[in-house]
Image (cartoon, rainbow, N blue to C red):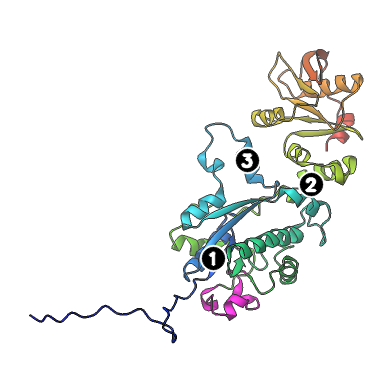
């Protein structure tokens, strides 16, 4: 038997004799909503050996966040989970949640590129998010930012011209990759530098999602929220109407996040330029309204099932208080009774009114916001 021992291979070295370092692994910051498109975009980059850090932005206007906040105890766990974190767990990707609310109302009130069909400042919103993503990219030493955007999928923010505007306004020119539509767009710096293989990216266009669904399911991911056209309250016609009413009567500079939250729930009645009544529509909304009772006048019938009501903006006069009680009585189980007791409480007082439920649509209808 030979005593010869094959020597272990020596590590490669540079000409000066120092060990050579392995090539740096490319790193991407991916905007992760948890939806189909962003999940697929992250997966495509992972398959190229790119390190992915997910970022999920909270604007304060997300409908899914609100559904979690108002869900009943024991609700379906799928309604309570955070989809961005769920997608990150499926992919084995860390996801950082970033609260944008500090300066996001400025974007909503003064959009440089205007609104969509309602109060949605989609182009400015996207640019604002991507500015924050750029700062995270620089902090993490990442090479580029990627999104799940698909050319032509959304009418305002995902056209070629507006996608270029967003890239420029965010400061990410050349460093913003859209993996799902990359082959229909100008090559980015990471593609040109060979950090990303352009041939392994997609060239999707349009509003259909069947291709994305087939691709993600072929990769073993089947638990994702069905595409539903976005999750922003500002794209909702009813919410936008209430938001515009609030802006008109409170002034842009005076609105705050309590105002934004109250607009998400209930029936809203504009009683005067300085007074509104908000009436809950179900048990979850009643519970949500209770969080905002301090400093407002609260209405509820002690004798029959029904909603909670709160005044907003100012305190009502005695006549306005009785009117609010009569409006609330209309939405109780005693709505057809001759008289309903309504308990009223406010800053430093409590009392009860006996009122006839108010049914005059000629008066009440125009008050609905």
Q: Which residue is mark 2?
A: 240
Q: Position of residue 66 (x, y in %)?
A: 65, 41
Q: Which residue is mark 1?
A: 211
Q: Nearer the viewer, mark 3 or mark 1?
A: 3
| Picture quadrant where residue 290 is located | top right
Q: Position of residue 369 (x, y in %)?
A: 83, 38
Residue depicted at 71% across the width and 71% down the height: 160
Residue 97 seen in the figure: yes
Residue depicted at 50% across the width and 64% down the height: 43
Task: Look at the image and give the residue range highlighted in magenta.
Answer: 177-201
Horizontal placement of 134 versus 313: left or right?
left
Viewer-side residue, 275 vs 21: 21
Viewer-side residue, 69 vs 338: 69
Viewer-side residue, 70 vs 369: 70
Q: Which residue is mark 3?
A: 67
Residue depicted at 52% across the width and 38% down the height: 76
* CA distance separating discs 2 and 1: 32 Å
Horizontal placement of 149 versus 15: left or right?
right
Specify few, some or many for label 1: CA neighbours under 10 Å numbering under 14, 14-19, or 20 or more: few
* CA distance separating discs 3 and 1: 29 Å
Residue 222 seen in the figure: no
| Magenta run includes residue 181 | yes
Q: Position of residue 201 (x, y in %)?
A: 54, 73
Q: Dot 3 lies on which element?
A: helix
Examine the rendered structure and indicate whether residue 329 appears above or below residue 238.
above
């Amino acid at each position: 038997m030979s005593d010869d021992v094959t020597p272990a291979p020596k590590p490669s070295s540079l000409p000066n004799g120092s060990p050579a370092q392995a090539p740096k692994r490319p790193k991407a910051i991916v905007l992760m909503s948890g939806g189909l498109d962003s999940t697929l975009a992250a997966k495509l980059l992972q398959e190229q050996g790119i390190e992915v850090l997910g970022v999920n932005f909270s604007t304060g206007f997300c409908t899914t966040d609100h559904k979690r906040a108002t869900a009943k105890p024991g609700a379906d766990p799928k309604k309570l989970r955070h989809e961005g974190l769920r997608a990150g767990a499926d992919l084995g990707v860390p996801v950082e949640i970033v609260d944008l609310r500090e300066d996001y109302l400025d974007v909503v009130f003064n959009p440089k590129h205007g609104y969509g069909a309602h109060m949605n400042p989609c182009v400015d919103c996207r640019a604002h998010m991507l500015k924050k993503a750029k700062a995270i990219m620089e902090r993490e030493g990442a090479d580029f930012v990627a999104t799940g955007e698909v050319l032509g999928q959304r009418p305002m923010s995902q056209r070629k011209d507006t996608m270029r505007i967003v890239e420029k306004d965010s400061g990410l020119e050349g460093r913003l990759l859209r993996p799902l539509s990359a082959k229909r767009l100008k090559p980015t710096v990471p593609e040109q530098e060979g950090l990303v293989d352009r041939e392994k990216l997609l060239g999707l266009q349009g509003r259909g999602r069947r291709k994305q669904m087939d691709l993600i399911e072929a990769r073993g991911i089947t638990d994702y929220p069905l595409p539903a056209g976005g999750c922003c309250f500002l794209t909702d016609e009813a919410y936008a109407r209430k938001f515009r009413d609030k802006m008109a009567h409170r002034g842009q500079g005076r609105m705050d996040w309590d105002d934004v939250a109250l607009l998400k729930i209930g029936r809203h009645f504009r009683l005067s330029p300085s007074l509104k009544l908000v009436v809950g529509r179900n048990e979850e909304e009643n519970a949500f309204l209770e969080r905002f009772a301090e400093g407002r006048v609260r209405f509820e019938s002690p004798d029959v099932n029904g909603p909670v009501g709160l005044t907003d903006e100012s305190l009502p006069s005695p006549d306005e208080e009785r009117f609010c009680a009569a409006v609330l009585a209309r939405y109780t189980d005693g709505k057809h009774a001759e008289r309903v007791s309504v308990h009223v409480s406010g800053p430093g007082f409590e009392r009860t009114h006996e009122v006839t439920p108010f049914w005059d649509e000629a008066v009440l209808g125009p008050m609905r916001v």
